[in-house]
Image (cartoon, rainbow, N blue to C red):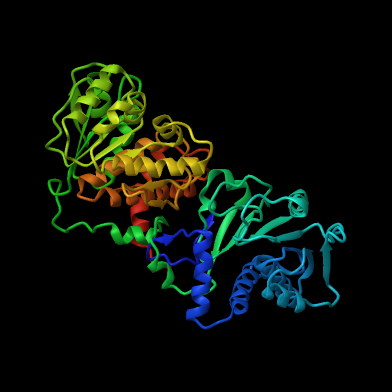
Amino acid sequence: MIPLDMTALPHSHLIPILSAQQVREWDQYTIHTRQISSYQLMERAVTAVASWITTRYAPEEWHVVVICGPGNNGGDGLGLARQLFKQFYDVTVWLVGDSKTVDHQTNLDRLPTSEGMRLVRWPDSLPPSDRTTSPIYVDALFGTGLKGPVSGIHAEVIAQVNARQGLKIAIDLPSGLLADEPTTGPCVEAEHTLTFQVPKLAFFIRENERFVGQWHALDIGLAPAYPDDLPKQISLLTIPYIRDILPPRSTFAHKGTMGHACLICGSDGMMGAALLSGQAALRSGTGKLTIHAPRHGQLIIQIGLPEAIYDADPHDQVWSRVIDTTRYQSVGIGCGIGTNEITHQALKGWLSSKPEQPLVLDADAINLLSSHPDDLHLLPSGCILTPHGGEFNRLVGGAPDSWSQLTNAMVFARTHRVFLVLKGAYTRIITPQGDVLINSTGNAGMATAGSGDVLAGLMTGLLAQGLSPLHACCIGVMIHGLAGDLAVDRRGSQEALLASDIIDHLGHAFQAVHQSTDR
């Protein structure tokens, strides 16, 4: 599974991914509308973190070291130290700098002075060695208010934390991590990040994996109405949301009412891609599937996938001609077609015919567009492109980091009026309006040949059933990732996962979505 914990999140709708500034405004909105003080809100956060820790780590087995900065994140840490001490934990506080907020000073004044609680002030003295072999380091140095890279004494503290053996838990954000932009300075490397109410965009960035660890969203009672008033440019998909947009099948459905999909796929040596995408398309629920493939692929298709209709290309080894696709309700192109110039001319000719059916372009179709960028203007509005990171970088040019790649993807989707499915951990769907939806299912075992073919076939089949491109993207990536998660659970390891295992578990994934609840 992707390292996240969304048990405290509202699963009945899309979860907004807010900027650090928006989260601070949400805090103020809650204080105003709920008529509570900022200190009371801080105590809610402290209680949520304390509850998370106490339900997992027994006081007799762990010594807790809380590293507190001078702001409100440090105030959270001081409040946590007090609450854990009252629940019989042995606690040490590293206090870095003087109080800069009233709430921080209040919690510092309330810190117990009894035996079992140690207070070490930086930089007046360095913290001694840990008392036990099982310390928990709770990082409360900085939160979302950090504006740039950490330096000086704070960088020394972060280095101390990272160098020590023990469990690392960060409150809200690992200190040094920037919520909304690339992190260039030192950062706490946490195993767990206990964030408040909703996740931060930084959690979904590849370069931040070693800092964030597994994130957990803790409910601290922020007013639920506030995000509804915000433009949700970036959101996190949930399984119950997919359940709500997945249409039920009519009792009187038959193959003629469930759509006819077409896949143009395969080439000499790559007919397996045709089989994988074809199987996934049929597992999507589409009524009929036609596979257009090179002539030498006939036996492979008709024996390996007898449920599909085979349409032979006149060329023995590659897709070589424009075909009439007007009778199909969706078309998917690219899985294993290769990058032969004959195939490029076929793709260009087909796009030039201005097809009206919903379209998925994957793999070599995208690679052909990358090597012939003048063809990009032929992309039909609202079509779906499904590149992985390397394919996308070839399409638009390299990016120095994942933040830049996401920005490039938003610009590309808006410019060409397409849906972009940027595959990988936390697969991102970017709409023609530049909005981003982040997938929350899947695992590293799906980094295996053929996994992308399965996704392309699945989405092509969903489109054939009349789903909008947006809903086909959302359902496709969620079901695909969930099937991968179920396959790992039942097969036993990520290392042994095959693309065919994902196909075998698509039915179980659909079942899990249909049976899901809002909690």
Query: Does residue 80 appear in the picture of this structure?
Result: yes
- Residue that protrudes farthest toward the bottom in the picture: 35
Is residue 93 positioned above or below 148 on the image? Answer: below
| Residue at image coords 83%, 59% | 123
Image mark count: 0
In front of the other: 231 or 339:
231
Tell me residue 336's x, y (percent): 33, 27
Tell me residue 55's x, y (percent): 64, 69
Q: Quadrant of residue 232?
A: bottom left
Is residue 268 positioned above or below 43 on the image? Answer: above
Tell me residue 267's x, y (percent): 30, 22
In front of the other: 429 or 96:
96
In front of the other: 255 or 145:
145
Tell me residue 172's x, y (percent): 60, 62
Q: Is residue 118 left or right of residue 177?
A: right
In front of the other: 317 or 236:
236
Query: Does residue 280 appear in the picture of this structure?
Result: no
Q: Is residue 501 left or right of residue 119?
A: left
Q: Is residue 129 left or right of residue 275?
A: right
Task: Assign the C terminus to one quadrant of the image.
Answer: bottom left
| Residue at image coords 24%, 57% | 247
